[in-house]
Each structure stands twice: as structure tokens, then as C-alpha cells.
Image (spheres, rainbow, N blue to C red):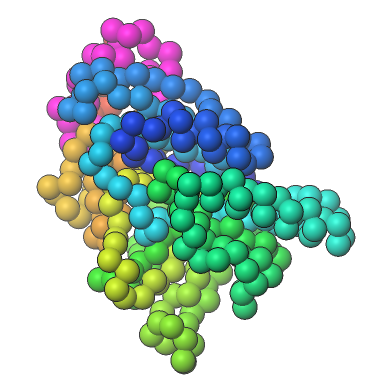
Amino acid sequence: MASNAGKIIPHLWYDKEAKQAAAFYASVFPQSKVLHVTDLEGTPSGDVDVVSFEVWGQRFAAISAGPLFKFNPSISFMVNFDPLLFGQGASAAQEARKSLDSIWGKLGEGGKVLMPLDKYPFSERYGWIQDRFGLSWQLILTNPQGDPRPPVIPCLMFADANNGKAEAAIESYLSIFRNAKPGVLHRYGPGMPNREGAVMFADFMLENSWFAAMDGGLQHGFGFNEAVSLMVSCDTQAEIDHYWGKLSAVPEAEQCGWLKDRFGVSWQIVPSAMDDMMRNGSREQIGRVTQAFLKMKKFDLAALKRAYA
């Protein structure tokens, strides 16, 4: 099964629990670990924790920066339990199901079931759950056809005012990112619980990272927000300029490398050099870089390097 270690990684905003959540996920999922923790001082949220971690090969970043944003199911994480990960034959399918059930039980402690763990027309074993921190996960026993998919894939649900826009969003993202390709696309048919032709499920690849999308219908009462954003790592200022110019559609949302696209999805367009600065810099260097980027909307790579030096 493919990894999801591309240049786009999900970023999670917590009130105070980023380190606790990262440690929890590392204990729940296979091949998962906390990679790095950095303390940023003097931000508008005070002193904050920035955490980097992996969940089954999927990189994540997280921050504890106050109660400004709350998770909701508009962006969840689909976990594919592919029997091929567990061996061959009937015993592999049993092990995959056993692993799914075990992780479901751990995620459910203090959480909330959104769709019960059961057999559905699209899978022998599937459930949608919100964990104790509010983050949503879709666990599914898969029978993949064609190209392999990573175990963990961010999934965007276009609900309420965004319902019916999943296909347009996918087409937009495929046109913006240079290394991109569509995957599967399944539509709602007549008599199904959304308008005919809407996207029931689709997936697509951007810069070696897989994503899923669906139209979620009306009257959910939630939409995309900054609690989950997509962080794009850029090697050059030209890359930063390209993604910023193509994605940003809400000028008032532009701050510290953050933007919102025309569908309301939050992105962070960041220089890849910042990762090294935050991992290896001295307390003084990290402080100077922090104070420099707090004054920016779109990141200025040369100015950040000067602050670091």
C-alpha cells in the first residue's frame, strides 16, 4: 500500500491538547510516532506547542493555540484497512477486521459515533467516529482495485452551502498542483440521499498525497474552518507565490501563511526551510523567525532567512 508522505500535510488546531492528541494517535495506530515538538513564544495565542507526528505513514502537524476553532466532520480522516497489509487469504481479511475493530474501540473512548460500525453497501465493515478530541475518522475494510491507496487519507465533505461542489473543487485542485491526477469517482443515483449526479465518493492525488472528497447533503450545520488546514511545503518563493495566487480567495483570511480558497478550505503555504529552522534553531533564532512571520500574510522566504541568520 502506498504511503502518504507528500508535500501536503494536514494541520490540526487544538486548544491545549496537541501534544496529548499526538501521543494518543501514536499509541492507537500502527507505524505511528511523535516526531518533534517545538515551543513558540510570543504569539497572539501566547506560548504555543507545535507538534509533528505520523499516523500510519501519514504526516501531520498540530498546534495548541487556544479555543478559536473546533473540529467538525467536514474534514475527516479515512483509514483504509487493506487485507494485503495483513498477509494473504482469509486470515489476512480476518486480521484486517480485527485491527479495525480494535482501533475503533480505542478511538471511541470518550468519543462519539457518527455512523455505527456495521456492514454497508460499499464495505463489509465501516464506521465513522469522532474521537475524544473532536477529530473525525472513517474506518473502512477495503477491497482495493487498481492503484494502491495509503492507509490514512484526508477526506473533504462538501455539505450545506457547499453541497454539490466536490467535483468542481477536485477539478480546481488538479489544475493548481503540478503533480496531480484523479482517482475513482462514484456519483449518487436516483433515489439516493443526495441529488442525482452529486459526488458520493471520489479520490485524487496532489503532489504524491491522496485525498478523498464527497458531497454531504444539506442541513449538517457545519463547514470547513481553520481547525483542519492543508499545509503545502514550498522550496522556493516562486512556489509560494504560485500556490498563494491560485488558492487564496478570501483576503480577510490571509495571515501568517494561512489562506482560504473559494470553497472555504483553509491552506497554509509555507517554505520548507521553516521546518529545519523550527527543528534545529536556537531559542533566539526560533523567536526571531516567529516575530518575523507574525507580521506577514504571504510568507517572504528571504525575510525569514534573514531573521533566522
Which percent across, then down, holds residue 115?
51, 66
Direction bottom: furthest residue:
190
Q: Position of residue 189 (x, y in %)?
A: 49, 87
Residue 221 image-quadrant placement = bottom left
Q: Quadrant of residue 15?
A: top left
Using residue 97 as the reference point, say whether residue 128 is left or right of it. Answer: left
Looking at the picture, does residue 155 appear above or below residue 119? above
Q: Residue at x 42, y 43 (%)?
A: 133
In front of the other: 56 or 186:
56
Would you place residue 234 above or below residue 44 in this image? below
Magenta stretch containing residue 102, yes or no?
A: no
Which of the 4 quarters of the picture holds residue 120? bottom right
| Front residue of 112 and 276 | 112
Give the quarter of the figure containing the C terminus.
top left
Residue visible at 50% across and 70% down in the picture: 201
- Residue drawn at point x = 40 percent, y = 48 percent: 134
Looking at the image, which is closer to me, 288 or 247? 288
* Residue range corresponding to the magenta coloring: 272-299
Say above or below: 49 vs 29: above
187 left or right, relative to 286: right
Indicate yes or no whether the magenta region holds residue 295: yes
Residue 208 in the image, given as x and y percentages of width and height: 53, 48
- Where does the image place residue 142, in percent across and percent down from the top left? 67, 63
Disc count in the image?
A: 0
In the image, taking residue 149 as reference, residue 253 lies left or right, namely left
For the stretch drawn in magenta, the main secondary structure is helix
Write the residue at 43% across / 35% down: 61
Residue 305 visible at all: no
Res. 116 visible in picture = yes
In the displayed structure, does residue 32 sit left or right of residue 169? right
Residue furthest toward the front?
110
Q: Nearer the viewer, residue 200 or 115?
A: 115
